[in-house]
Image: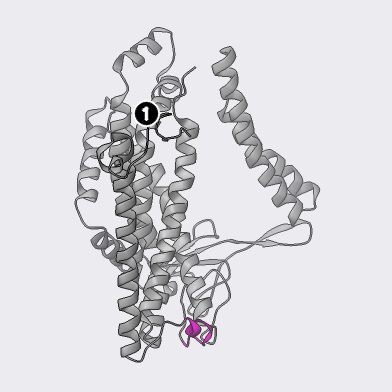
């Protein structure tokens, strides 16, 4: 860091803080910082004084009190006698689940739609344009309600799966899609399953290591190594081999119709599925435009030069266009991930209990601690937004073009 001290023999006076261009910017920044601190100090003092006048105080002791309400969708054990803190944790996990899955599905749909919008096929190009214009110009809350209504009205009820003359049947005797929710097989981990899971995680790491090695070979020596099939092999083969070597320690628990509903397996409520699907297809419309803009920003001469070398279209897209387009796609993609995460707070519209529905909804109404709960909500969304930005910025630095 360079010093801003005055040249030797030149005296320093306070007037230079304003008149000298070397110090003027620092002076104004310091003044703005002092004013900002003073403003927040005044607002905090005013809030504390108003609370004292009203006989109130900021306290988070309510988090240790029994919540007294149930949560229909949860990833950890919880009942009505659990504390408000545990209810908040359940809401946080529900929010993170729908945000994580939503970002993945939105990215897949968005990239596919963005590429197809540039297709040479007129019909496909127009269909993708219609999709983008419809979904991005209708509020996401409307799509959440529409998809929830469609799932409830169209999908069969569990009673329709009963008997020989059932109106509906399970998919492969393992999946059931009903008006109450979706049922999936649930893995049951027995003794020896740890080594299988560790092998699978090691395979995932191996895929990234191999792809990095293949990329270095391409850029440094011009050797084009196969990537897709080796990645597929690393993903499946080691874990499957270890699964049989360890004596098949992982089994599946399948849902089965018992009484008036399905039992066993993994149960995903319609509220969760509709929220996840609506957020994904809504955000995907914006991601598709980001992808299309990034691809169009790459000079057409790059494509023509690659084609003149005999590269196939898919190779041109993977090796020439996308690496250059990513530097344009990633920055707005970060904003779309942040928007999807914050839009998940609309979950209460369909009864999905996220952090806004638990801490910012029922807990706030029961305890009356509006300031405390709102501050916690702000802190959570700020933390998750900064975390997403940090991770995506690291990825952006990894894929950006580097000068030799």
Residue 352 seen in the figure: no
* Left or right of 38 on screen, residue 393: right
Name above or below for residue 42 compared with residue 48: above
Crowd rating for badge 1 (residues with CA inside 10 Å; few <14, some 14–19, many 20+): many
Q: Position of residue 340 (x, y in %)?
A: 35, 54
* Residue for point 47% across, 23% down: 402
Q: Is residue 382 magenta?
A: no
Q: Position of residue 104 (x, y in %)?
A: 44, 48
Return the residue nearer the eye: 186 or 4. Answer: 4
Return the residue nearer the eye: 290 or 32. Answer: 32
* Left or right of 164 on screen, residue 15: left
Q: Is residue 67 magenta?
A: yes
Name above or below for residue 273 compared with residue 215: below
* Residue for point 63% across, 30% down: 210
* Left or right of 31 on screen, residue 232: right
What segment carries the magenta color?
60-68
Identify the element where label 1 is drawn: helix
* Residue for point 40% across, 44% down: 107
* Residue for point 38% across, 50% down: 337
- The residue wearing badge 1 is 325
Q: Position of residue 189 (x, y in %)?
A: 70, 61
Return the residue nearer the eye: 223 or 355. Answer: 355
Q: Position of residue 32 (x, y in %)?
A: 29, 53
Question: Where is residue 177, by image quadrant?
Answer: bottom left
Residue 393 seen in the figure: yes
């Amino acid at each position: 860091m360079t010093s801003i001290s005055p040249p030797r023999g030149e005296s320093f006076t306070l007037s230079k803080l304003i008149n000298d261009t070397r110090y003027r910017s620092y002076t104004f920044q310091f003044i703005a910082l002092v004013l900002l601190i003073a403003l927040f100090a005044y607002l905090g003092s005013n809030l504390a004084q108003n609370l004292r006048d009203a006989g109130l105080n900021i306290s988070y002791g309510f988090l240790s009190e029994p919540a007294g309400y149930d949560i229909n969708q949860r990833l950890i054990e919880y009942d009505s006698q659990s504390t408000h803190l545990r209810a908040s944790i359940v809401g946080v996990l529900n929010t993170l689940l729908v945000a994580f899955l939503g970002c993945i599905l939105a990215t897949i749909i968005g990239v596919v739609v963005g590429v197809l919008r540039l297709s040479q096929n007129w019909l496909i190009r127009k269909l993708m344009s219609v999709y983008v214009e419809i979904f991005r110009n209708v509020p996401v809350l409307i799509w959440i309600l529409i998809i929830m209504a469609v799932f409830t009205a169209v999908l069969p009820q569990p009673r329709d799966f009963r008997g020989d003359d059932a109106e509906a049947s399970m998919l492969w005797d393992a999946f059931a899609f009903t008006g109450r929710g979706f049922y999936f097989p649930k893995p049951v981990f027995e003794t020896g399953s740890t080594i299988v899971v560790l092998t699978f995680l090691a395979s995932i790491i191996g895929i990234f290591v191999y792809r990095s090695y293949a990329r270095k070979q391409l850029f440094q020596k011009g050797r084009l190594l196969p990537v897709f099939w080796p990645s597929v092999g690393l993903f499946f083969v080691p874990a499957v081999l270890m699964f049989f070597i360890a004596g098949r320690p992982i089994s599946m628990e399948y849902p089965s119709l018992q009484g008036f509903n399905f039992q066993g397996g993994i149960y995903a409520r319609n509220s969760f599925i509709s929220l996840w699907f609506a957020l994904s297809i809504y955000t995907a419309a914006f991601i598709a435009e980001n992808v299309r803009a990034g691809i169009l920003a790459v000079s057409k001469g790059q494509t023509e030069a690659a084609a003149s070398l005999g590269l196939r279209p898919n190779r041109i897209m993977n090796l020439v266009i996308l690496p250059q387009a990513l530097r344009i796609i990633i920055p707005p993609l970060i904003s779309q991930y942040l928007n999807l995460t914050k839009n998940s707070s609309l979950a209460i519209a369909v009864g999905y209990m996220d952090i806004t529905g638990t801490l910012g909804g029922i807990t706030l109404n029961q305890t009356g601690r509006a300031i405390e709960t709102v501050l916690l909500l702000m802190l959570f969304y700020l933390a998750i937004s900064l975390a997403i930005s940090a991770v995506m910025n690291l990825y952006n630095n990894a894929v950006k073009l580097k000068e030799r």
